[in-house]
Image (cartoon, grey):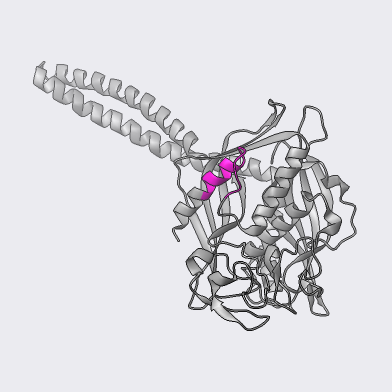
Amino acid sequence: MDVSNFRKKYTDELTAFYQGGTFPENSSADLRFGLACQRNRVNKKGLTMVKKFEKTGAENAKTSQFVKFPYTYTVASNRCNYETDFYKDGKILSRSDFSEETLYMGILDKQSKGQAQVSGQIPGQIQSMGQERYTCKNCGHTDFMSKFTSGCPMCGTTYEMQQNYPCVSGYYTRPTVLSKKVYKGVMKFGFVYFGIFGAILGLIAGLSISQEQGYDIGRTIFMSLFAITIFGGGLLLFTFIMFNLMLGPMLAAKKMAQHSEVLDVQAAAATKTRMETDLKRYVPDFSYEFFEEKVISLIRGIVFSDDREKLTIYDGKDDLSFMDNIVDIEYRGAVEYVGSSVIDGILRVSVKAYVVSAFYHGGNMVEFKKQVFQVILAKKVKEEDYGFTIHAVNCKKCSGSFDAIHVKTCPYCGAEYHLIEDNWVVSQINCVETATANKW
């Protein structure tokens, strides 16, 4: 997989989606669900939300990978110009600055090796994997995988096939300290004006030297060009060196100003190492980045759901009515680790997630608030299944596959399905801190 091209393609798909288009083709099943819930919430409020992700020309692309065969989880980042607008009846209610930010994207890929690797659900690559053979877990019938798209041809057991690979499992943005546009603008200004000033000084110096040594047109031109090169080039070099020397303090000042707004986030991010150290005692292949994405995905799923009492991803009794008017959530880039424990084989992790939420209570204003969600998640102690999706789980009894987002019993055999045995479940969530914000 070409990560760079895939990232660019998905960014275009995401922009088209937020301009009223279809769901991004390369989204994971869980991300598609979250996007669908948010679009439904925005539509019910009578709003139109438009997000724009435009290329800046400043690639600055970076990737980090975690491999757990057959899955490869990649966090890819790149700069983009980002903007969020809210409209009501065609009238603009809110528009964020069209600023340069860094877009972080979680990309999940799966390798096929001989027979299909089935872990929790059948892979969604039906076209490319259709000629591989699969054995029904219910009756033992073996056939080409393409024969199972409508269920087992012998016993009729149904298998959901929604997860396609590679897919984007989550994304978020963070502001950059100094955009390429600003850097180039300042450098261009300095080069032009100091270059002209240096050229004038060089011309004057060249003419003066030529007059002292006797006027000669050839010598005058040569000395003038020589002086222009020395003075002009010297000033340009001086401009470049001085600007970059000043750039450090400038960036530090801006970074400190930005940090004064996000000190809580910085403190939260500092708990990453402690979280990994603690949780790897129970789950050796624990990945902070993958867990972080799960937390944000679960929060968004709960926030934008209209029937939280039926959600299998939420098993709490909290009053979540404060979420009913949230129309957008921007992750601020940190999940703070509070603590963890294991009781009766169930791992419970307490974290704080830092976000900016957009609220719409009616009228002509969208209100932005910094929020800190205190979340307790629970899951049976076992290795993380990177390919798991709640929208295609397998029944432990008959192996039938079904969407379990609102279902706690198998629709085929009636057996109870306990999501906590396969995936993280939120047992408690509440907002512990709120402050007014423009965006960050």
Residue 44 pos. (x, y %): 77, 39
Looking at this view, is 251 or 295 the one in front?
A: 295
Is 15 colored magenta in this rendering? yes
Query: Number of callouts in the render?
Result: 0
Residue at 11% from the left image edge and 15% from the top image edge: 215
User: Left or right of 243: which side holds 168?
Assistant: right
Looking at this view, is 256 or 172 the one in front?
A: 172
Viewport quadrant of the C terminus: top right
User: Left or right of 2: which side holds 342?
Assistant: right
Is 396 colored magenta in this rendering? no
Residue 151 pos. (x, y %): 64, 70
Please tell me in which quadrant of the rendered image residue 311 appears.
bottom right
Residue at 40% from the left image edge and 30% from the top image edge: 188
Viewport quadrant of the N terminus: bottom left
Please tell me in which quadrant of the rendered image residue 122 appears.
bottom right
Residue 276 pos. (x, y %): 67, 69
Looking at this view, is 409 or 419 the one in front?
A: 409
Query: Which residue, as the protein is rendered here, is positioned at the far front?
Result: 154
User: Left or right of 186: which side holds 237?
Assistant: left
Residue 269 visible? The answer is yes
User: Does 384 sit above or below residue 329?
Assistant: below
Residue 241 pos. (x, y %): 40, 39
Looking at this view, is 149 or 330 the one in front?
A: 149
Residue 67 visible? The answer is no
Magenta region: 10-24
Residue at 11% from the left image edge and 22% from the top image edge: 219
User: Does 61 sit above or below residue 120?
Assistant: above
